[in-house]
Amino acid sequence: MRFRILLILFPAFLAMACGETPQPLPDDILTKEVFTQVMIDVQLIEGMKIHRLGPKRDKSPDMELLYGVVLEKHEIDKERFLKTYNYYKSRPEEMEVIYEQVLDSLSKLDVEVKKDYGKSRSDNLRKPEREE
């Protein structure tokens, strides 16, 4: 009986032992958490530029400046950002998780902004009280 149990469990243990071990992140690559925060800011800039400049946005000199502000905020340089972007781009499953988190954060931010915008509009639309 014990032999049968071992015979059944041995392949399971073998499969677990042979599974892929997570590779350590290279030193010059941003963690998923940090890269997600950077990408949230990048997407906010992209949205602003699309809204403001439309099709001319790629020719705008502001784009490089705004990206520079994001990189400075997160204390990284362009090379490290690009290296990190390419690293996660070559790992689609990880990039998908990052973009899901980015979209989730942007959706939450959208709700907050609409809520605040609605409050400020309704405050402005109220009739002023008469002084007597």
Image: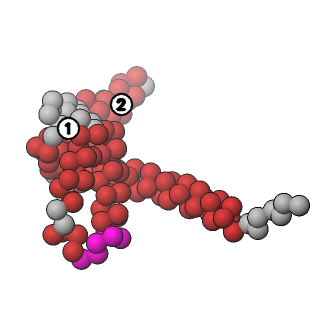
Residue at 51% over, 54% down? 108
Q: Secondary structure at mark 2?
A: helix
Q: Is residue 55 left or right of residue 108?
A: left
x%, y% of residue 129?
81, 62
Q: Is residue 84 left or right of residue 111?
A: left
Q: Which residue is mark 1?
A: 76
The question of residue 51 being in magenta is answered with yes
Residue lying farthest to the bottom in this orientation: 55
Q: Quadrant of residue 53?
A: bottom left
Q: Which of pointers 1 and 2 lies earlier in the amino acid sequence?
A: 2
x%, y% of residue 107?
48, 58
Q: Quadrant of residue 24?
A: top left
Residue 92 visible to the viewer = yes
Which label belongs to residue 10? none
How far is mark 1 from mark 2, CA to CA? 48 Å
Dots 1, 2 in contact, CB < 8 A: no
The answer to which of 46 and 86 lies nearer the viewer is 46
Classified by dominant secondary structure, the portion drawn in magenta counts as helix
Residue at 20% over, 48% down? 68
Quadrant of image for the N terminus: top left
Residue lying farthest to the right in this orientation: 132
Q: Is residue 89 left or right of residue 94?
A: left
What's the residue type where badge 1 is placed? Ile
Q: Is residue 39 left or right of residue 126?
A: left
Which residues, given as a range, are shown in magenta? 50-55
Which label belongs to residue 9? 2
Residue lying farthest to the top in this orientation: 2
Residue at 40% over, 28% down? 5
What's the residue type where badge 2 is placed? Leu
